[in-house]
Amino acid sequence: MRIRTIAEQRCSRAGSLLSCFLLLLGGCQLTNVPNQIEAQVQRVISGHTVDVLISNQDPPLMARIRMIGIEAPSWKQKPWGDQAKTCLQKMLSEISETGDQKSVMLELDVEEKDRYSRWLAYVWLDGVLVNEQLVAKGCALASPLVPNNKYDAKIARAQEYARIMGYGIWNPDQPLRLTPAEFRRQNP
């Protein structure tokens, strides 16, 4: 019978711990959720939330999507909330040549859903990141949502552009005075 050295015992325990950690980590991963999902926008709820139909599921699935990396003013934040919703509606209301609603691609990041059970996604239309475009037009603010940070730098650059250009909420004649989070705290 061979006596194991302390170093061998530690390596054995470390290997076991690593195996357990990897097994636990694997169990926490999203299952059967592709990174990109094709969907048709059914309704714009706000400047950062849409309802979509995912028709390639059986049965087709209606889902509420919260766009990652941005925060649009609340509908109570006049006039910016209405402008944010209208801006998103215009971007997503394009109709294809066949008369059908254009498809968008939903790209998931680390987390699947938020605390309100909305799916978290980046929305792509014809290869353009809609989340980024809303910020670049001054319709929404960049708002990192850790750990979902794949496009944070891109969205932050779009916000800097909108701020410098004075677009939308950055208009010097009528700027947004409170972030949506500050507005909600002051107006419950």
Image (tube, grey):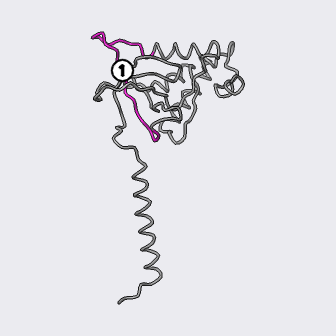
Residue 55, horizontal then vertical, whole percent: 30, 24
- Amino acid on which the number 1 mark rests in the picture: Gln
Q: Residue at coordinates 52% horizontally, 42% vertically from top-left?
A: 147
Magenta-colored segment: predominant secondary structure:
loop
Which image quarter is the N terminus in?
bottom left
Vertical position of residue 109 compared to residue 62: above or below: below
Residue 116: where, in percent of width, then height? 52, 31
The number of numbered badges drawn on the structure is: 1
Which stretch did the figure color magenta? 91-111
Q: Quadrant of the C terminus?
A: top right
Judged left or right of residue 39, residue 134 is: right
Q: Please name whichever residue, 77 or 118, is drawn nearer the observer in this view of the structure.
A: 118
Q: State the residue at coordinates (36%, 22%).
A: 53
Residue drawn where x is 31% and y is 25% of the image: 60
Q: Which picture quadrant has residue 121?
A: top left
Mark 1 surroundings: few (<14), some (14-19) or many (≥20) residues within 10 A: some
- In percent of width and height, residue 176 lies at 67, 19
Magenta stretch contains residue 105: yes
Residue that protrudes farthest toward the front in the picture: 59
With 55 as the anchor, is 30 left or right in this view? right
| Between 128 and 67, the one nearer to me in the picture | 67
Q: Which residue is mark 1?
A: 40
Residue furthest to the bottom in view is 1
Residue shown at the point (47%, 76%) measured from the top left: 10
Q: Magenta segment: does it hold 7?
A: no
Residue 101 screen position, x and y as percent: 34, 14
Find numbered disc 1 in the image and state the secondary structure of the residue it sits on.
strand
